[in-house]
């Protein structure tokens, strides 16, 4: 299922099987629109609770994600567990990369991961989404992406 607007495209994981993670359309638009950057927001549902509650696993995810999408990390990954309200309690993560940043919040109450990857260097948002789904053992996910100008 695909929803489009002028600034953003939302894809649900069942639709990704049909397009087989082919990012050629996004890459073409990125170049033709002379985009400054790409923001992918990935909501991963029903993640493995042990993985999203482990600072070490979250840090390992960041290292492996950056290697996968060819981003150079800048400094250390920050992972902090906080939130007085049970609805939002969980780890939050920020990793600077040379071309911007990667951030996420891991919601304990719903075992959901909210991952954002912003970079002025192009990367394949489908590859990042599928890797995150596999790493966190998510049931499914929604991917939204925006070309920044």
Image: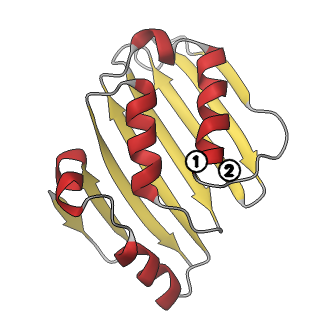
**Residue contact between numbered discs 2 and 1, judged by CB atoms under 8 Å:** no
Labels 2 and 1: the sequence-earlier one: 1
Which sits in the foreground, 83 or 134?
134
**Left or right placement of residue 20 versus residue 83 in this view:** left
Circle 2 SS class: strand
Q: Which residue is mark 1?
A: 68
**Residue depicted at 64% across the width and 26% down the height:** 60
**Residue depicted at 55% across the width and 80% down the height:** 35
**Residue depicted at 82% across the width and 46% down the height:** 74
Circle 1 SS class: helix
Q: Residue furthest bottom?
A: 32
Percent of width and height locating residue 43: 37, 39
Percent of width and height locating residue 20: 26, 58
**Residue depicted at 40% across the width and 17% down the height:** 87
Classify the position of the N terminus by image quarter.
Answer: bottom left
Task: Using the rendered image of the protein, determine whether residue 73 is visible from the camera's viewpoint.
Answer: yes
Q: Quadrant of residue 44?
A: top left
């Amino acid at each position: 299922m695909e929803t489009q607007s002028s600034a953003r495209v939302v894809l649900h994981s069942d639709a990704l099987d049909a397009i087989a993670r082919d990012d050629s359309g996004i890459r073409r638009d990125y170049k033709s629109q002379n985009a400054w950057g790409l923001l992918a927001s990935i909501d991963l549902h029903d993640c493995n609770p042990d993985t999203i509650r482990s600072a070490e696993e979250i840090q390992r995810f960041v290292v492996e994600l950056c290697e996968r999408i060819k981003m150079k990390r800048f400094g250390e990954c920050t992972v902090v567990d906080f939130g007085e309200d049970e609805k939002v309690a969980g780890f939050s993560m920020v990793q600077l990369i040379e071309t911007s940043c990667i951030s996420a919040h891991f919601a304990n109450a719903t075992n959901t991961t909210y991952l954002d990857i912003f970079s002025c260097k192009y990367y394949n948002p489908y590859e990042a989404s599928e890797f995150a789904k596999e790493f966190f053992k998510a049931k499914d996910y929604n991917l939204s992406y925006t070309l920044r100008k």
